[in-house]
Structures are given as structure tokens and as C-alpha cells.
Amino acid sequence: MASTVPATTVEPLEPARSARPGAPPALPPGPRAPAIVQTLAWAVAPTWVMDRCARTLGDAFTLTFAPSGMKLVMVSDPEAVKTVFTAPGEVAPSAAGSSPVAPVMGPRSVIVLTGPEHLRQRKLLLPPFHGERMREYEDVIVEATRRDMAGWPMGRPMRLQERTRRITLEVILRAVFGVEAERMHTLRAAISGLLEPVHPVAIVLFSLRRPSLERPTGGIGRALDRLDAVVYDELERRRRQPDLAERNDILSLLMRARDEDGQAMTDGELRDELVTLLLAGHETTATSVAWAIERLVRHPDKLARLMAEIDGLADGGGEEYMTAVVNETLRVRPVVPIVARMLTQELQVGEHRLPKGTRVVPSIYLTNRNPRVYERPREFWPERFLQSAPETFSWIPFGGGIRRCIGASFALLEMKLILRTMLSQLEPSVPERARGWRGGEWNRRRAITLVPARGARVVWSRRAGSTGSTSA
């Protein structure tokens, strides 16, 4: 990936070495650059770091961060990824509980929990996101997209990611709260405050701090306080409603859910799961839709093929190419670049026997681009998925194993419906001033996600024969 970090930032790297048979547990080699340099490079350009290390060190390498001395062992060989994802939960539990997301999502979030508690929460959360229940949200997705499209400028550049975030936030609010989403102005403001872009200098300063599980302070802390107040108020109000048993929104379903012992979720558990759904449930999908359009406008032949398929849906055509476009976007531009596990005992991962206490990190970004798996791995080429579906451990935008993203099916449905709705009426193109960027927009770090550096700037024009109002 392109980056503003010069190639001289990190010193030459040591070559990878295979573990000797019978050798004691040890970490793979890593950059020779000081930990402070590795930390700064990771804070500013994580994809550049991963690309460079994979090129010089191979499928497994160790990064060291200052001032804590924390080490991350990154792996991207599908067999190594499979080993980590399929290891028993008591051997390789999630490391999210010690990550920056834990104080925001809360200690009872399904993202943070491990072991039996994680499985309990996962079972309680699964029903709203599978089967026919999920299909009930289709009209909500299409209506939210059309409503936002009505205000899009024609013939002038706009940052698409800002608009897709508004669409997916509206969708998740309506899915979670139902009709009450109309009055959730305070909640929208609080969520926006939590997801405000962070200045690169602030990212660097944060990266140099020792890890902390303390609740955030400052602007993020105040936004989190407002978010909590709205959620707890809605829980109390919802319990007083006489139609709770008939409602189908996610909040009502979770409030009625019972575990195997007949126990309901506590208010604290409901709060943490709702915050997780609200934050994780829209930002990633919004960014993926923006990336899809950013890729398509730079490959006009693929955009034309997708629009032709969309036009054919009315005549009973399928969505094979749409599925391929979505899968390829998630492969070449994954929004979340890594996922971490903490080993509680020694584990053989590929050529390396890793010691207890290792943070082993399947790199979603590198695994999805492994040149031994994918032909032309850096290229946006949806056709690669027309003949066969993505393989389980070489295409991992949603993680894997028992901790695979609960909302994966919902996210795929939402991406397809938003793209179909947009491209059935409008045609995007590259802004005039951006046509010289042959590789398109590069990855920019936004908290723990990778977003288009320029916000996915596009110019929209109305397709012949389409209807609907947009601003001129």
C-alpha cells in the first residue's frame, strides 16, 4: 500500500529463520529498528509496516512497541491462521480485553469476553442476525440509502465515506431501537463524538502511552457518558412498554432473550452489547461500501459489469458479480487489519513454537494478500471469486473460528443492498483532480480501522432513465 512514510524510516530487516526441531519456544525475528521507530511507523502507516515486514521477513514476524515493550507476533500463512483460529478457547483466547476497545465497549461485550461467558453472550446475540430475522431489515437499508442519496450533489466531488456512515448509522439505530430511532438525536451526537477523526499527532502520542484499561477521559469520555445515559434511559423506558413481547427490534429481542439457565441479560450486559453493536455495527460496513466504490471507479470495466448485472435483476438475473465485488473489496481493502489472541500455553504456529504469554496476531490485511494463495494479490479483480468462494482461512475480513464476527451476514447483506440502491440510479466517477492517482486512495489509519485517505472522493451523475431527486 502507498504511504507517506519514506522507505528509509526502518532499517534493513533480518531474514526469517525456521525453528530447529526440538528448539525451545521462541518468537519469530522482527525488524532491527528500535522499538520506538516500530511504534511510530505502526501508528502512522500500519499497512506499510506489514507489507515491508512480510516482504523481508516472511509470513511470521515480531513487532515490538515502546515504551511498554509489548510484542506482537504477526502471521499470515493460512495454515498458521487456521492453527490460531481453531485453537481451543482456553489455549488462545481473545486479547481484546487488554486492547484500547475494551474500556469503550465495556467488560461484558462479546468482543471482550472469553471462555464460557463469551459463548453465553454469543448465543444470546446470534438470533437477530441470522435467517429470516435478518431479512426484515432489507427495507430499512434501502430506505435509509435512498433518503440520504436525495441530498447528494450531482457533478461535484463529495466524500462518500461521510455519507455511507450516515446511512449505516441510521440502519443500525433502526435495527436496534425500531421506531424509537426517530428520537435518538442525543444518541447520534454521542456516537459521532466517539467516532470523530483523530489527528495523526494524537495517534502517535496515544501509541507511545503504556496500555491502559481505564475509561477514556476528555471528549471521548464525555461522549461515552452521553451514550450510556441514553442507553440506560431507553432500557428503563422499554421495560415499561406493554408491547415488549411483540416487538422485533434487536433491543427488544435481547431483553427477552434467556440463556440455558433461564437467566436474562443484566442492564450492564445489555449496555455493553448495545454499545458494541452501535459502534462496530456501522463504521466498518460504511467504510467497506466506500472502499468498494473507490475501487470500482478506478476500474471502469468492472463498474460497468456490475451496473449491467444490477439492471438485469428486474428480469430475474442473479447477483454473482455483486457478491464477487463485495468479497474482493473485503479482501483487498479490509477495514480491520488485525485480530489478536493471547496464548495461555505453548503453541506450534507454522514453523514457530510460540511461548506462553505470546500475543499472536493473524494479520487480516496480509493473509488476504498472500501471494501464495492469490494471483495478482494487490490487484482489484472480482473475477477471481466467480469460479469459487473465498477459502475459510485465506479470506478473513470477519476473523475466524468461534469468534468470527456475529454480524458478518448482516454486513454482507447491507453492503449489497446499499451498492445496488446507489448504482441503480447513479453512476460514480473519479474526480478530475484525482485521475492522476493511478493506485487510487491509500489506507489511512482511523483508530483501529483503515479508511480511504481522502474519504473516497467521487463524482456522481444520474443514470439515463433513473428517477429521484438529488441536489444539483
Image (cartoon, rainbow, N blue to C red):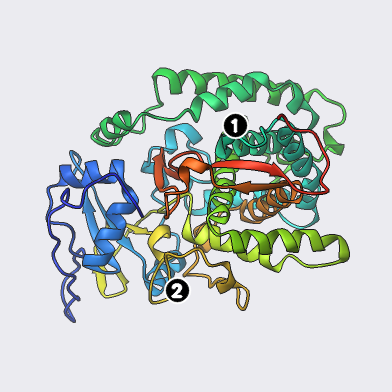
- Secondary structure of the residue carrying tag 1 is helix
* Quadrant of image for the N terminus: bottom left
Res. 349 in view: yes
Taking the image as shown, residue 60 lies to the left or right of residue 182, namely left
Decide: few, some or many residues near mark 2? Use Cα within 10 Å; few <14, some 14-19, many ≥20.
some
For label 2, the residue is 374
Quarter where residue 367 is shown: bottom left
Res. 260 in view: no
- Residue 344 pos. (x, y %): 33, 58
Marks 2 and 1: CB-CB under 8 Å?
no
- Residue 159 pos. (x, y %): 55, 36
| Residue 308 to residue 338: above or below | below
| Residue 291 to residue 368: above or below | above
Residue lying at 74% horizontally and 20% vertically, measured from the top left: 183
- Residue 217 pos. (x, y %): 39, 20
Decide: few, some or many residues near mark 1? Use Cα within 10 Å; few <14, some 14-19, many ≥20.
many
The kind of residue on which mark 1 rests is Arg
- Secondary structure of the residue carrying tag 2 is loop
Quarter where residue 247 is shown: top right
Residue lying at 43% horizontally and 59% vertically, measured from the top left: 364
Seen as rendered, the residue at the extreme bottom is: 21
Residue lying at 69% horizontally and 34% vertically, measured from the top left: 170
Question: Marks 2 and 1, how far apart in space?
Answer: 41 Å
Of labels 2 and 1, the one closer to you:
2
The kind of residue on which mark 2 rests is Tyr
Residue 271, disc: 1
- Residue 185 pos. (x, y %): 67, 20
Is 410 or 216 nearer to us in this picture? 410
| Residue 310 to residue 142: above or below | below
Upstream in the sequence, badge 2 or badge 1? 1
* Quadrant of image for the C terminus: top right
